[in-house]
Image (tube, grey):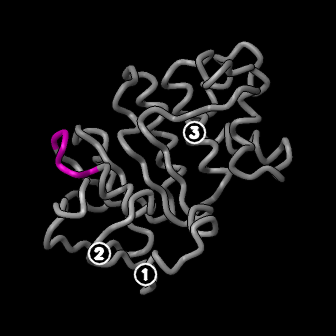
Amino acid sequence: YTDQQSVLERFTLSIPAGQTLAIVGHTGAGKSTLAKLIARFYEFQGGHILIDGMDIRDFDLTAYHSQLGIVPQLPFLFSGTVADNIRYARTEADDDEVAAAAWSIGGGDWIDALPQGLETDVGEAGKGLSLGQRQLVALARVLLQNPAIIILDEATASVDPLTEAQIQEGLEVVLRDRTALVIAHRLSTVRHADRII
């Protein structure tokens, strides 16, 4: 990205509150760029991104990010337990709230598969869990956070079919009554979206 080259020219998109919008396209089409612009991970040279009619560049960045739930393709987990990693979204949450969020994702079957349930140590950077389990922890974290806007960037791209089914069940819970941007390569992962571009 350079100041001399525009990436998204003459691009206009409106997402009504509460809508799940899926963005599907080939590698390099700009899907993740759009998500990073909305999250204000990238500054932009022209145009506007408005939320409720206000330019996101006028928002306090920390306050704005607290209203965004982001699940990347490779979610980062911290050393500690599964419960610690879910609680990271809202550090004041008690054990019952953490457990409720976890059990709401995929029916909680994934928790039963963990050696010590929510007290399972995830290892450094989450290496003690499979990629699918890390995604499920990230979804539970977002559910506990309860953000207004959710961005899922290829959340099911690198998982097996069984885990993808658990993640899809979790997505139904996480996306309910929230504005969401779901980025995917495969149409099968976004079949429940309100709109696909």
Depth-wise, is mark 1 or mark 2 nearer the camera? 1
Q: Amino acid at mark 3?
A: Ala
Depth-wise, is mark 1 or mark 3 nearer the camera? 1
Q: Residues within 10 Å of mark 1 (few under 14, many from 20)?
A: few
Residue 41's image quarter?
bottom left
**Among numbered discs 3 and 2, the one appearing first in the sequence:** 2
Residue at the limit of the structure toward the bottom, as seen here: 53
Q: CA distance from mark 1 to mark 3?
A: 28 Å
Secondary structure beneath dot 3 equals: helix
Q: Nearer the viewer, residue 148 or 35?
A: 35
Give the residues drawn in magenta, as a range.
Answer: 26-31
Secondary structure beneath dot 2 equals: loop
Q: Amino acid at mark 1?
A: Asp
Q: Relative to 102, is 76 on the left or the right? A: left
Q: Residues within 10 Å of mark 3 (few under 14, many from 20)?
A: many
Q: Are marks 1 and 2 in contact (CB under 8 Å)?
A: no
Q: Which residue is mark 1?
A: 55
Q: CA distance from mark 3 to mark 2?
A: 27 Å
Q: Residue at x 50, y 59 (%)?
A: 176
**Count of numbered badges drawn on the protein:** 3
Q: Residues within 10 Å of mark 2 (few under 14, many from 20)?
A: few
Q: Residue at x 59, y 49 (%)?
A: 142
**Among numbered discs 1 and 2, the one appearing first in the sequence:** 2
Image coordinates of residue 87 in percent, x first then y, are 74, 43
Q: Relative to 175, is 4 on the left or the right? A: left
Q: Which residue is mark 2?
A: 14
Q: Which residue is mark 3?
A: 138
